[in-house]
Amino acid sequence: MTQPTPPPSGTGRSFLTGADALTDNVALLEWCEHSRRILHAGALELGICASELDARLRAISRGPVGGMTGRARARQVARPIQQSSEALVIASRYMVTAASRFQAVYLPELEAVGYRQRSRAQFKFKS
């Protein structure tokens, strides 16, 4: 299994604990990014496990059991794992949304303390 990265800011807090992220804007944004990375890694891990389990269970073939083929039985077991993987992908997207909304909604307060958003390179049209 993929090992999670250490918590942000050297807090020593455990997996996905956000209490220390509630102290300032930098800690909150780091926590959102850290959480997104953990959720994304978990999603990848679950997706791979679901695929491998499905393939291995399909190889077990004794003919129809309980009215289901080997493929249907394998899918019935692996599908919830795959769905949990998809749920973690969605959760990681929401972490990005939370960080973006924090920056957008609290921009006046952030600018007052000297925070600057990362500037994106402007798209330039040329003839």
Image: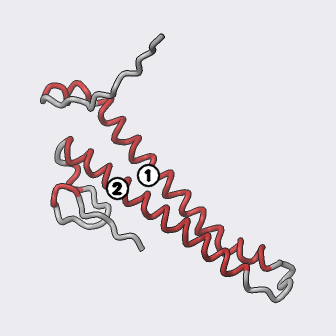
Residue shown at 24%/61% (left/top)? Answer: 7
The scheme the figure's colours follow is secondary structure
**Sequence-wise, which precedes: disc 1 or disc 2?**
2
In the rendering, which numbered label is found on residue 56? none
Identify residue type, mark 1: Ser
The spot of residue 37 in percent (x, y) is 37, 56
The spot of residue 83 in percent (x, y) is 60, 62
68 shown above or below 45 = below
Residue shown at 73%/79% (left/top)? Answer: 58
Q: CA distance from mark 1 to mark 2?
A: 7 Å
Relative to 105, 47 lies left or right: right
Residue shown at 41%/21% (left/top)? Answer: 123
Q: Which structural element holds mark 1?
A: helix
- Please say if the residues under marks 1 and 2 sit with CB atoms less than 8 Å apart: yes
In terms of depth relative to the viewer, which is nearer, 126 or 33? 126
93 shown above or below 3 = above
Q: Residue furthest top?
A: 127
- Disc 2 marks which residue? 35
Identify residue type, mark 2: Ser
- Disc 1 marks which residue? 92
Relative to 118, 46 lies left or right: right
Q: Which structural element holds mark 2?
A: helix
| Residue 105 sits in quarter | top left
Instruction: Bin the neighbour count of mark 2 within 10 Å (Cα to Cα): few under 14, some 14-19, many 20 and up.
Output: many
Q: Disc count in the image?
A: 2
Relative to 110, 37 lies left or right: right
The spot of residue 71 in percent (x, y) is 77, 75
Residue shown at 71%/76% (left/top)? Answer: 74
Screen quadrant of the N terminus? bottom left
The spot of residue 104 in percent (x, y) is 33, 29
